[in-house]
Amino acid sequence: MTNAPEQRRSAALTPANYRAVRFSMLFFIATQIVPFVVLFEAKYLYDGSYVSPQADQGFGVAGAVLMALSAWVAWQALRARTGPDARERVATRLKVAAGLGLLAMLTVIYQWGLRYASPQGRFGEMYYVISGADMVYAVVGLIMVGIAILRNARQDMAPERFWTAEASVYFWVYVALAWIASWVVVFLL
Amino acid sequence: MAHAMTVPESGHAPRPRKAPMPPVLRAFLWAAIGFLLLNTFVIAVDPFRGHPFVTGPSVVFGWVGAAIGWLLGIGLYDAVLLPLMGFPTRWQERQQGWRRYWEFATDHKVIGLQYMMFAVGGFLIAGGIAMLMRYELMTPYLTIFHYPSNYLTAVGIHGTLMMFSFATVFMIGGLGNYFVPLMIGARETVLSKLSGIGVWLVPVGILTVLFSPLLGEWSTGWRGYEPLAGQDANGILFYYLGVLALTMSSLIVALNLVATVMFRRAPGLTWGRLPLFVWGQVTVNLLMLIWFPEIQTTFVMALLDKVVPLNFFTATGSPLTYLMLFWLFGHPEVYIIAVPAFAIWNEIIPVMAQKSLFGRQWAVIGLVFVMMLSGLVWAHHMFTNLRNSEILPFSFFTEMISIPTGFAYMSAIGTLWKSKVRLNTPMLWILMSMFNFLIGGLTGVFLADPIVNLQLHDTFWVVGHFHYTIIGSMVFSGFGAIYYWLPKLSGRTFNETWGKTLAIITFLAFNLTFSQFFLLGLHGMNRWVPAYPAYLQPMNFEVSIFAFILGAAFLGNILYIGYCWRNGAQAGENPWGAKTPEWFTSSPAPRYNFPVQPEIVGSLYLYGEGTKVPVVTTALGELAATSRATQDPQFDWHDYAPDGGGVTS
């Protein structure tokens, strides 16, 4: 009900609501495995285990490692949620995670700029589509992490208000795992 | 039976005096800005495309900008984004009046009605296009459509809107959103804000598909078949994008309803007591959560095929892969539409017969097994493309799926057996639905036989089978459900004579139209053609006449329901004597559904002497001492009442 003052802030989560929305978020993330299953199957169908000799393995590794690091740092933000300077520590970790994610995205953009694989070729079309899917999910994840950073800067870190940050971390970890799986499928298998 | 009670609407702060612009108008404006921004940006940076202002890539990005602008304008910005980022907002939810249906809302009942409203809009548009198609087919040569591709575009828009903006949206987005929380004794849904945003993707999808001819014709029908789509103009882009918006909306519904059923069931409402309609919704929601991301990925790949261009599904790629990926989703989609109808049969029949539901467990098992088998039969849509060795397993599973489907019939017929059923309007619609789906199912068994399928595949037999299956199950059950729940939705009822008359006219017109599709098919009438051999004209002419009557009958029903909603006689609190929880609150239900959390103490489907009232709405203090509170140390009534809900403990 809306007895609150005219200018309202978001409502706090109750424990029962927290369990429900966490289930929903994790279930949603599980459904987002399906697109990558389709893409990986298509990769296998169209060009099997072929990897273009021009594909830069170094950049592939760099992107995957950066995303793995980013996910690990983001996960540390969840563990920093309590304590006297929780807000600062969470914000720092989220910012570092976002920065590492941006760097990983730059490695892909750089590779795209090299245009070493033609989108008309079998390897090229799957490479661009799978790495493109990684990028789209990463952009969505970065927006979520950005919102969490903004929110944490403006609100206290009480557990019932921490869900936004937690949800963004869950999604970001999923993005990193999908990214690493894509690297394995495109560059290694 | 407990008395229905009304929640006193607690006072809320007045809305700000200056409402800058009605949300829908603001959404249109922001959508236009979003489109112009991204479209212009792509035109400016795309070095390959020459100089038209709207190109394939630019319109795709422009559409994304328009969709984001639309959602922000309708309420995403004020109601979700600002508070999410910790900024203050002036947004307040409107609690009364018709305007709340034309803006962002979090009340699942408002959202349910919004879904129904948009779905009926899609139904009327797609139905109007069907009338044009039947007018065209009254003559064996082209009349109102100048080229076959114009006709095929109309067929595509008709099928796409019917499947994605009506069938799925009405049953799950509309009835599911409105009734699932009520039927499980919940006070609201888990993801109410997300749900309030998701519903506004439906008009995005409908308008996108409807205006697809602006970008050129497309000839693939609702399936977007490749490599045919590769020959089409850019209209096919709006098919992919429109379906993306519609499926995204339905995906949100599925997620929200599954979470709500998992976490918001009333105390005592175990899985074994869950209402049949809710079981139906949960099973199809799980199907949607698996298969909708799959088809969305497929459509993105097809979109890139067209825009970049790539070669996934072109003649040099693998068109068969597109067919596989489409029907992997496509056949479950049919059951996503039909399973809620099965559930509605067994929801309404025990009430009208006032007799315990026969074989309740089997009815539930049937729904679940249909859900599981629906993912194993996709290739029966592709018998003409497969080798014999590949056909057999799909033929087998297709015939097997008729067994769990039969469980729904078994429970329904077992309940009707020796009962004194009230043959009123909702019951009439349900019986008609059962008859029609039976015809659809039996003709489907013919098609599951590869030898017959190869002869009939490209004929009107398949069109007849499909319409008996979809309209027969979903539309007839949908009307039955609306007549059944009209007293709950509006607090008003209808005149039985008018209701039955309209139902019978619809049933006759439907059967006289679509039963002859089978004969047309056997006589050699092909699908997907606006011109045909002259010897088929008399039957086509006659079928079109019945189709027009059918269209008028559907329209008549919609108008009559709308009339009764406003002007019907006042309905009683529980006019049918039902036992499911939605009838244990006032009609229409108040903002948070139940003034006091109901508790379920018995089966919802037992009737007869000695059966007890299964839903109790005791005083809050008494209920606080029940098992739920003692089992869960974190149990808190406020969890059920956002912002306290006006309840004090």
Image (cartoon, rainbow, N blue to C red):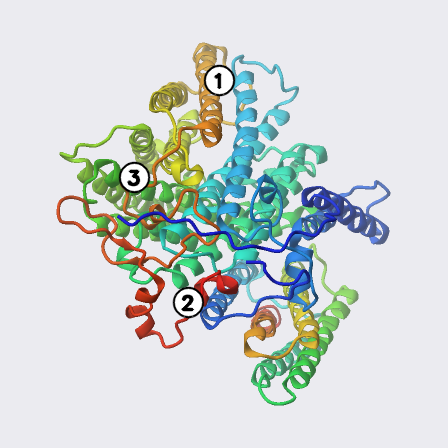
Question: What residue would you read off at disc 2?
Answer: B637
Q: Can you tell which mark lies on residue B548? A: 1
* Badge 1 amino acid: Phe
Query: Distance between the Cα atoms at labels 2 and 3?
Result: 32 Å
Q: Is residue B375 visible?
A: no
Query: Distance between the Cα atoms at labels 1 and 3?
Result: 30 Å
Tell me residue B589's x, y (percent).
Answer: 43, 47
Mark closest to the chain's N terminus, 1 or 2: 1
Tell me residue B59's x, y (percent).
Answer: 74, 45
Tell me residue A65's x, y (percent).
Answer: 64, 80
Foreground label between 1 and 3: 3
> In percent of the image, x 76 and y 49: which residue is there?
B34
Mark closest to the chain's N terminus, 2 or 3: 3
Question: What residue would you read off at disc 3?
Answer: B348
* Badge 2 amino acid: Trp
* Badge 3 amino acid: Ile
Foreground label between 1 and 2: 2
Report in which chain the residue with disc 1 lies: B
Q: Is residue B430 above or below residue B502?
A: below
Report in which chain the residue with disc 3 lies: B
Say if labels 2 and 3 share a chain: yes
In the figure, is residue B375 to the left or right of A7?
A: left
In the figure, is residue A114 to the left or right of B554?
A: right
Describe the element under mark 1 as helix, strand or loop: helix
Tell me residue A132's x, y (percent).
Answer: 67, 62
